[in-house]
Image: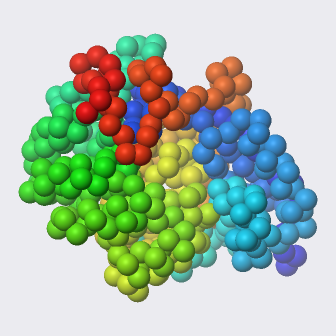
Amino acid sequence: MKRPVITDIRATTVTVPLEAPLRHSNGAHWGRFVRTIVEVETDVGLVGLGEMGGGGESAEAAFRALKPYLVGHDPFELEQLRFKICNPTASLYNNRTQMHAAIEFACLDIMGKFLGVPVYDLLGGKMRDAVGFASYLFFRLPNKETGAGEIRTADQLIDQALNLKKSHGFTAHKLKSGVFPPDYELEVYRALAKAVGTDSVRYDPNAAFTVEEAIRFAKGIEDLNNDYYEDPTWGLNGMRRVRENTHMPLATNTIVVNFEQLATNVLAPACDVILLDTTFWGGIRPCVKAAAVCETFQLGIAVHSSGELGIQLATMLHLGAVLPNLVFTGDAHYHQLVDDVIVGGPMRYVDGKIAVPTAPGLGVTLDRDKLGRYSDLYKSLGGYAYDRDPARPGWFSTVPNTRWADPADDRIVDY
Ligand SMILES: [Mg+2]
């Protein structure tokens, strides 16, 4: 049988609404996600799907510019693809890791469709039929149109957590934080942990604390049922100093995102749990390789979410399916969205888990109508400043941060 070769690549930027704007330590998602959907065409009629965060004309043009690198390439040749697109020394001048990830997803999708097998079968076979997720809670601003969905108090957060637990079956709850003063967030997080009973919790201020603040905060939560304490401060050395001062496992998705950093973390441990992101690491396969290193050195792992629509979610599910050492539930922003661009609408959570797609390839199909609708919506709305908070005009994030939002009125308070 003739093997497929790549003939073309297409990228379409879409924006899909969230229930309400999501706040984080670097700024906010202003009520929607912007994502780039990638389609890789082959000479046998198979089309592979990929996805990348962000978008716009420059992202679409950047994918188009890769066409000369890809035309004639056999999608099964993934190691060659890695060096064609992101040779580590050439990448010093032109970092294409995240674009490589989207193309790797598409190539795996093509391989699976060509062979009639799901992607997990190309990665060693599945260990589980569904992947578990935490509830992933955010402080939120009200939805601009309806005025609903705001979360800034402990009561509002607990309401959201218990509602999500009821509808989706979550048994782990993650609070994205680093918005309000640490003492306020400590109170809210402790109230959340109490409200969810025996469920586990995790706190992630996206590295906004000083080392000293991170240690002080750790002392305030060590008695809770924490899965881990995620990126309380910035840098391998900062995290190492926090780690020396708490018995909680430390997790990261920011300072161990490639093999060089993973090697450093093995030689001089700073983090206990490595959160694997199929985009940050450059594809599903680099995450599988990194998980094997973690298995060898007995580091924990979990599946990270950098924001996803259904294609990216499928990559997270196939990754989660094949990892023997996956103990922690993953993170997904997915339930904060109101829609998706795949046929059949958003995938469903059952008992806090999402079933791994079993159809050939990634197992998801683009809904052309929705792709068109959300591409038009992007054209009318444009992008948004992920690294700014609409409620704090003039503010920008620093590492460490000391200028928090006042819980009452979002005035900037220097702590
Ligand atoms: Mg994180």
Residue at 72% x, 77% y: name it.
79
**Residue 409 at x, y = what percent?**
29, 16
Name which quarter of the figure residue 164 lies in: top left
| Residue 256 seen by the camera | yes
- The image quadrant that residue 233 belongs to is bottom left
In the picture, measured across the screen, residue 372 lies left or right of residue 353, that is right
Please indicate whether residue 311 sits to the left or right of residue 127 in the image: right
Residue 261 placement (x, y as % from top left): 50, 71
Can residue 43 be seen by looking at this rendering?
no
Number of marks:
0
The residue depicted at 46 percent of the width and 52 percent of the height is 305
Q: Residue at x 80, y 70 (%)?
A: 84
Query: The N terminus lies in which quarter of the figure?
Result: bottom right
In this picture the colour scheme is rainbow
Q: Is residue 326 above or below residue 211?
A: below
Locate the C terminus and report the quarter of the image it occupies. top left
Give above or below for 157 relative to 209. Answer: above
- Looking at this view, is 214 or 331 the one in front? 214
Quick check: 50 above or below 109?
above
In the image shown, does 359 or 195 lie closer to the viewer? 195
| Residue that appears at 29% across and 26% down | 413
Residue 285 in the image: x percent, y percent?
A: 59, 72
User: Which residue sits furthest bottom?
Assistant: 296
Tell which of 13 and 363 is nearer to you: 13
Q: Is residue 111 above or below residue 169?
A: below
- Residue 298 lies, in percent from the top left, at 34, 81
